[in-house]
Amino acid sequence: MRPAMNPTLSDGLLFSNRVALVVGGTRGIGAACARILASAGATVVLTGTDRARAEREAQHLAADYGVKAAGIALNLNDYASIGATIKSIAAEYNGIDALVLSAGVMQSTPLGLTAESVARQVLDVNLLGAIEVLQASAKVMMRRRRGAIVLLASLVGERGAAGQAVYAASKAGIAALARSAAKELGPLGIRVNAVAPGLIETDLLANLPADVIATRCAQTSLRRLGSAAEVATTIRFLLSDDASFITGQVLGVDGGLTL
């Protein structure tokens, strides 16, 4: 008799009976991840700094895909609240199976003109807040010795960019965090990967001048911007059982910009 197979990406219920936490799930890549995971049958808990917006997004997911969804407020600057919030989510939904950490802020100022307050905000949210989320979520996953995590790094963290030194440093830290966490958590059944998007059409592009965007598009092999949905599809794969032997990777989703 042919053995039963795990669901694959072609199956509509790929994430049925799984709880996915999407931190930063109200806009951009995070919102696209929330949608694609809901479409695959996951119970989705998404967070954002605006509680009302998070709740609306969750209501849309539940209505559009017939899944359980919840939207809650979470500010990665408020370290003390992160652990308690994630612990509460785990208690409410009996665990967390998948984590997408998409929340982040970007600054675009010359290094010599970057105020300390701006630098601290970027590092507090993009890196220190990410560490808190990862720690708290990993503790939940350890109890059942399984889980999959994807962090959002960036092409800028790999290559650097003039005017984005602090942002680049924060995202380089995310890549290192993913690799290190993969080594530590792998023996506990938890996979950790990161994606490093290139030029993606989200509201973060508002921080870049039009001529910079045009120049970078011309440098990609595909000669265009990427979409949030294209990054989300990659993240869904990394969270799925189809990627069960993949951990510690930082996967570029950049249209060939790094070639």
Image (spheres, rainbow, N blue to C red):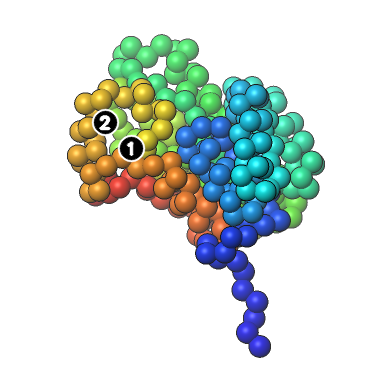
**Which amino acid is tagged 2?**
Ile
Mark 2 surroundings: few (<14), some (14-19) or many (≥20) residues within 10 A? some
Above or below, 113 against 144 in this view is above
**Which element type, helix, strand or loop, lies under badge 2?**
helix
Residue position marked by numbered label 1 in the rendering: 199
- Choose top left, top right, bottom left or bottom right for residue 244: bottom right
Mark 1 surroundings: few (<14), some (14-19) or many (≥20) residues within 10 A? many
Which labelled disc corresponds to residue 94? none
User: At 70% from the left edge and 26% from the top edge, which residue is drawn?
Assistant: 81
Q: Quadrant of the N terminus?
A: bottom right
**Which amino acid is tagged 1?**
Leu
Give x and y (percent) for residue 155: 35, 39
Above or below, 241 against 87 in this view is below
Q: Residue furthest bottom?
A: 1
Number of numbered discs: 2
Q: Would residue 198 be visible to someone looking at this image?
A: no
User: At 33% from the left edge and 45% from the top edge, which residue is drawn?
Assistant: 254
| N-term-proximal mark, 1 vs 2 | 1
User: At 47% from the left edge and 51% from the top edge, which residue is drawn?
Assistant: 233
Give x and y (percent) for residue 161: 29, 30
User: At 66% from the left edge and 42% from the top edge, which residue is drawn?
Assistant: 62
Along the line of sight, the residue nearer the viewer: 50 or 150: 50
Q: Are marks 1 and 2 in contact (CB under 8 Å)?
A: yes
Above or below, 87 against 211 in this view is below
Which labelled disc corresponds to residue 213? 2
Q: Residue furthest front?
A: 63
In three-dimensional space, the C-alpha distance between marks 1 and 2, rounded to whole angstroms, equals 8 Å
